[in-house]
């Protein structure tokens, strides 16, 4: 048996990272019978293409569905689409309730000055980072905050999460698109 961390899960097939190698695995039937749900971030035991056990979790976030996080990076755009502070507040509360440090990422600084909203959240103690994923501005500061931590990114459609992922890890090359003018969100 080996131990590793689930880094991706799609359609019952899981990618498990162990000692620098990625293994494709399925959940063993006993996990399903016991109603154990595998989450990205789970530490697991596996062998012969099957995950046999989920190791104890430090935390679980229901949305996005991830486990064992140190930080949740909540991405919000200052413009295009307009900031949704209700969603931002909801995600910060969920993260804190689950014992995960929220970090607020204000993206698209090339479109509007983010200081007005970021000051409010920084004043109450939330770590805030202003970036422009498109130009790469301040992406290195974000990378430093991630170093050695298990992290996830969350935010509404169209705020620039995929563009940010591409700036942080160019080898991933996530598909990006324009904001729908009618719906004011990603397509």
Image: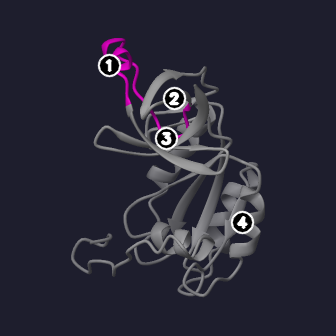
Lateral position of residue 158 relative to residue 59, left or right:
left
Q: CA distance from mark 4 to mark 3?
A: 20 Å
Q: Quadrant of residue 82?
A: bottom left
Report the residue marked by disc 3. 40
Q: Between label 1 and label 4, give the one nearer the viewer.
A: 1
Residue at the spot 64% in from the left edge and 26% down from the top edge: 58
Q: Which residues are magenta?
A: 27-43
Is residue 38 or residue 178 the one in the foreground?
A: 38
Is residue 169 or residue 109 the one in the foreground?
A: 169
The image shows residue 14, relative to residue 88, as above or below, that is: above
The answer to whether residue 32 is magenta is: yes
**Of helix, strand and loop, which one carries label 4?**
helix
Give coordinates of residue 136: x percent, y percent.
64, 83
**Of helix, strand and loop, which one carries label 2?**
strand
Q: Residues within 10 Å of mark 2 (few under 14, many from 20)?
A: many
Dot 1 or dot 2: first in sequence order is: 1
Q: CA distance from mark 1 to mark 3?
A: 18 Å
Give coordinates of residue 165: x percent, y percent.
54, 68
Is residue 132 or residue 120 the one in the foreground?
A: 132
Dot 1 or dot 3: first in sequence order is: 1
Quadrant showing the N terminus = top right
Q: Residues within 10 Å of mark 4 (few under 14, many from 20)?
A: few
Q: Residues within 10 Å of mark 3 (few under 14, many from 20)?
A: many
Dot 1 or dot 4: first in sequence order is: 1
Report the residue marked by disc 4. 143
**Of helix, strand and loop, which one carries label 3?**
loop
Report the residue marked by disc 1. 29
């Amino acid at each position: 048996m080996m131990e590793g961390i689930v880094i991706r899960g799609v359609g019952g097939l899981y990618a498990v990272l162990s000692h620098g190698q990625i293994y494709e695995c399925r959940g063993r039937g006993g996990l399903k019978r016991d109603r154990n749900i595998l989450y990205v971030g789970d530490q697991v035991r596996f062998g012969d293409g099957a995950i046999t056990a989920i190791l104890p979790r430090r935390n679980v976030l229901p949305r996005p569905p991830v486990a064992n996080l140190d930080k949740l990076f909540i991405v919000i755009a200052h413009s295009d689409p307009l900031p949704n502070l209700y969603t931002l507040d909801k995600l910060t509360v969920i993260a804190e309730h689950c014992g995960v440090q929220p970090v607020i990422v204000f993206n698209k600084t090339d479109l509007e000055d983010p200081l007005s909203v970021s000051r409010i959240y920084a004043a109450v103690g939330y770590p805030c980072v202003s970036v422009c994923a498109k130009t790469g501005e301040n992406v290195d500061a974000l990378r430093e905050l991630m170093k050695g931590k298990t992290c996830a990114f969350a935010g509404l459609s169209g705020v620039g999460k995929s563009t940010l992922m591409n700036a942080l890890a160019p080898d991933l090359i996530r598909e990006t698109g324009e904001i729908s003018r009618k719906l004011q969100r990603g397509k």
